[in-house]
Amino acid sequence: MAEEAKPLLIKRYASRRLYNTETSDYVTLEDIASFIRQGREVQIVDLKSGDDLTRQYLLQIIAEHESRGENVLPVDVLTDLVRSYTTQAQSVVPQFLAASFEMLREGQSKMMENFATFPPVPGFEALQRQQEAFLKTLMSGWGAAVGTAPEAGGEGAGGREELDAIKKQLAELQSKLSKL
């Protein structure tokens, strides 16, 4: 359990390459972002000087996502952040942001807990089976082996009918798309 609380140590070499000390391989910024999304704490240090570079790399990850059009931070917020570096608000902003994100995380957790308590939606299982059958058909080469396509959910003729209905809908969609 102590191992899980310990942050994943990433070392930056003089060549600016990032080295994952846990798996003994090089990683990219996107890999680091993925670790963080999975709930891992990450610490990035300069191998030579020992300086903690975590903040610098986290800001770089955010900047790259924002520059790709994955805008999470509104311009007003970014402007206020820049202003906070030159005002007395600088001492209050970190605590405010930390508290705000903590409230957001708690709200998301509660929402997911509440969502799990909703009664099942009628017909949802049938819709889910249709979707699974569609994906199986799609993955099997668009029906290259139509006679050997797997039955949806092992339901025999009922699964075959659903599969045929999905194929018909797909053909209709393709027809409409070709007309456009």
Image (cartoon, rainbow, N blue to C red):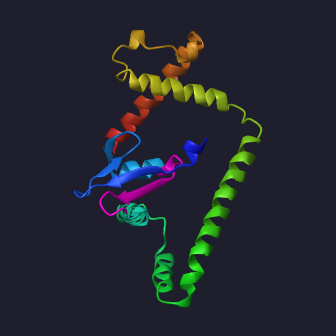
Question: What is the number of callouts on the image?
Answer: 0
- Residue 118 in picture, x, y percent from top left: 76, 42
Residue found 46% across the figure and 81% down from its top: 79
151 sits to left or right of 47: right
Vertical position of residue 98 compared to residue 19: above or below? below
Q: Is residue 42 magenta?
A: yes
**As displayed, is residue 158 above or below residue 131?**
above
The quarter of the picture where residue 52 lies is bottom left
Q: Where is residue 95 in the image (x, y as percent from the top left)?
A: 61, 74
Q: Give the range drawn in magenta.
A: 36-50
Rendered-image quadrant of the C terminus: top left
Out of 91 and 29, give the one closest to the viewer: 91
Which image quarter: residue 173? top left
Q: Residue 91 in magenta?
A: no
Write down the quadrant of residue 154 in the picture. Answer: top right
Q: Residue at x 48, y 69 (%)?
A: 73
Identity of the residue drawn at 57% across and 82% down = 91
The quarter of the rendered structure image containing the N terminus is top right
Residue farthest to the bottom?
Answer: 87
Identify the residue shown where x is 64% and y is 62%: 102
Residues 148 and 32: in front is 32
* Position of residue 136 in the picture relative to residue 113 (left or right): left
